[in-house]
Image (cartoon, helix red, strand yellow):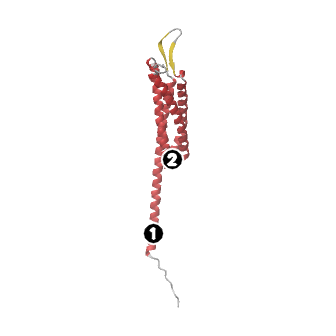
Amino acid sequence: MATTTTIEIPAESSAINKGKAPLMIGTSRSSSSFNEKEGGYNKGMAILDFILRLGAVITTLSATVVMGTSDETLPFFTQFFQFEASYDDLPTLQFFVIAMALVAGYLVLSLPFSIVAIIRPRAAGPRLLLLILDTVALTLNTAAASAATAIVYLAHNGNQSANWLAVCQQFGDFCQNVSGAVVAAFVSVVLFVILIVVSAIALRKQ
């Protein structure tokens, strides 16, 4: 007499097995959509970085050119004396022109790295390099702008204790150009601060 054994499969286990596949598909879809959103966010931050760099290039170049061409000669002069004011008469303003030219050159060279960050929004290397170099450039930019501000203040107001006269009363055009260059330099300082914050946020998201 032959004995047969029947193994019954519970309905619940088969239902569970059937329900696993849709759950895994839904999870993969949500993770892929999250990655797409994160990639789009990083690309948007990289585009903002590039736009801010273009603005900083314009402001730093403007500050350099305006300060470097600041020169005024008064119409009245004698055979032995000629009243002239130029940026190269003061070492502080010469430092301003050199420092701002270096910062402007760095910003131009940093544009390709910013483009790489747009093309490859998940690459952390270019962003980290730009963050470090932007901090150095910000320090140089701030030092030049602050030093030139002290000279511009003395030119406008003078110093009675040191018997320094306010030369802007005679050299109005010169002081106007120098003041405009200093304002442009501080605008670039603000742009650098925003650039550093943007790079830090982008790196944190990665």
The residue indicated by pointer 1 is 18
Q: Residues within 10 Å of mark 2 (few under 14, many from 20)?
A: some
Q: Amino acid at mark 1?
A: Lys
Q: Give the secondary structure at mark 2.
A: helix
**Most foreground residue, 144 or 195:** 144
> Where is residue 180 drawn, in percent x and y?
45, 26
* Residue at far bottom of view: 1
Residue 107 showing in the rendered view: no
**Marking on residue 161:** none
Does residue 182 lie above or below 204 as drawn? above
> Where is residue 104 drawn, in percent x and y?
53, 32
Query: In the rendered image, which quarter is residue 101 located in?
Result: top right
Q: Residue at horizontal 49%, vertical 28%?
A: 63
Q: Give the secondary structure at mark 1.
A: helix
CA gap, disc 2 and disc 1: 41 Å
Q: Earlier in the sequence, mark 2 or mark 1?
A: 1
> Where is residue 122 drawn, in percent x and y?
52, 48
Does residue 65 lie above or below 47 as drawn? above
**Marking on residue 203:** 2
**Most foreground residue, 68 or 110:** 68
Residue 151 showing in the rendered view: yes
Q: Amino acid at mark 2?
A: Leu
Query: In the rendered image, which quarter is residue 170 located in?
Result: top left
> Where is residue 28 drawn, in percent x and y?
47, 59
**Most foreground residue, 157 or 28:** 157
Q: Say whether marks 2 and 1 touch (CB < 8 Å).
A: no
Does residue 41 lie above or below 177 as drawn? below
